[in-house]
Amino acid sequence: MDPDPVPSLQPKKGFGQHFLIQASAIRAIVDATLAAPSVRLLEIGPGPGVLTAPLLEDGRPLWAVDLDPEAIEVLQARFRDTPHFHLVHGDAVHQDLPPGPPFAVAGNLPYNASTAILTRFLLGGLPWDRLVFMFQLEVAQKIIGRAGTKDYGPLAVLAQTAARVTRLLKLGPGAFRPAPKVDSAVLVFEPLADAPPPEARRALLALLHRSFQHRRKTLANNWQGFLPPDRIQALLASQGLPPAVRAEAVPPSTWRALLAGLP
């Protein structure tokens, strides 16, 4: 375990903060982020700045967004003489940033907002060409889950429709302060060249929420009142799906085709 880089900043449960203190993990996240061709960087939830400092060494302009006012004070003091550092006090789920080319984005995401933050990027809320994000292991498994497994759901379909997703690291509680009660994982997202446009992704997510609303029910049952029964069966048949198929059995590529077949 590595020493705490900024002992004065206390993690706050209300912000879902667990500060990363393992040097090898910090280096791996930074290297994966800087490998992107982006001309500007973005960090979500920098906290004490353990990722911020090595990211800034690259020289590319870095925006950092944090909701914790105490973290903002620490970061302002620590990097006040760094002209390519742009600190934003705000909520990454909603915060606007200057328009421009895509970001390479890093973040040890707060546990209580990680899914909402990821969804914003996946739906095209901000431009990006790489995401390197830390999640609770359980959440990470729901993102990389495969069709036919219990982890497979709307988030997995959306993520795998928009990006190539790979697991970079798995970390135990000792890599953080305070130590969480669960393991964590770092995932890397790289946008797919043929990913549907943002408006289609939003429509897909709405369809997925309806389709997975009752996991034990068939798609036909979950779609009752949404499409006429004959239209449902015709749409399923067009993709080679049996009449009693459940949402969890449909792979991401087929979801795109189903969406395209809707009126």
Image: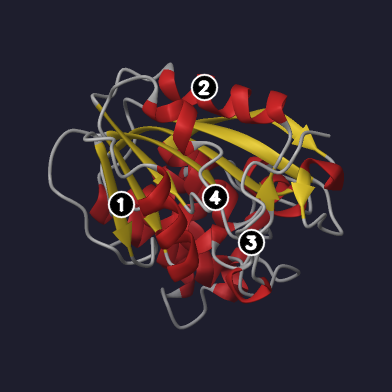
Counting from the top left corner in percent of width and height, residue 222 is at 58, 74
Mark 4 vs mark 3, foreground winner is 4
Q: Which mark is residue 52?
A: none
Label 3 residue SS:
loop
Mark 3 is surrounded, within 10 Å at the Cα level, by few (under 14), some (14 to 19) or many (20 or more) other residues, namely many
Q: Can you identify the residue that label 3 sits on? A: 17
- Which residue is labeled 4 in the image? 48
| Residue 200 % position (x, y) | 29, 52
**Which mark sits nearer the N-terminus, 4 or 2?**
2
Question: x, y percentage for residue 105?
Answer: 40, 38
How far, Cα to Cα, is label 4 from label 1?
13 Å
Cα distance, mark 3 to mark 1? 18 Å
Q: Which residue is mark 1?
A: 87
What residue is shown with label 2?
Answer: 32
Q: Quadrant of residue 194?
A: top left
Residue located 38% across and 29% down the image: 56
Mark 2–mark 1 CB contact (< 8 Å): no
12 or 183: nearer the viewer? 12
Q: Which is more toward the observer, 159 or 140?
A: 140
Earlier-in-chain disc, 4 versus 3: 3
Q: Nearer the viewer, residue 5 or 114?
A: 5
For image coordinates 21% across by 35% down, the residue present is 83
The type of residue carrying mark 3 is Gln
Mark 2–mark 3 distance (CA, rounded to whole Å): 22 Å
Using the numbered discs, state the Cα–Cα distance from disc 4 to disc 3 in whole angstroms: 11 Å
Residue 32 appears anywhere in the view: yes
Amino acid at the residue labelled 2? Ala
Distance, label 2 to label 1, CA atoms, is 22 Å
Looking at marks 4 and 1 on the same chain, the residue that comes earlier in the sequence is marked by: 4
Quarter of the picture containing the N terminus is: top right
Disc 2 or disc 1, which is closer to the eye? 1
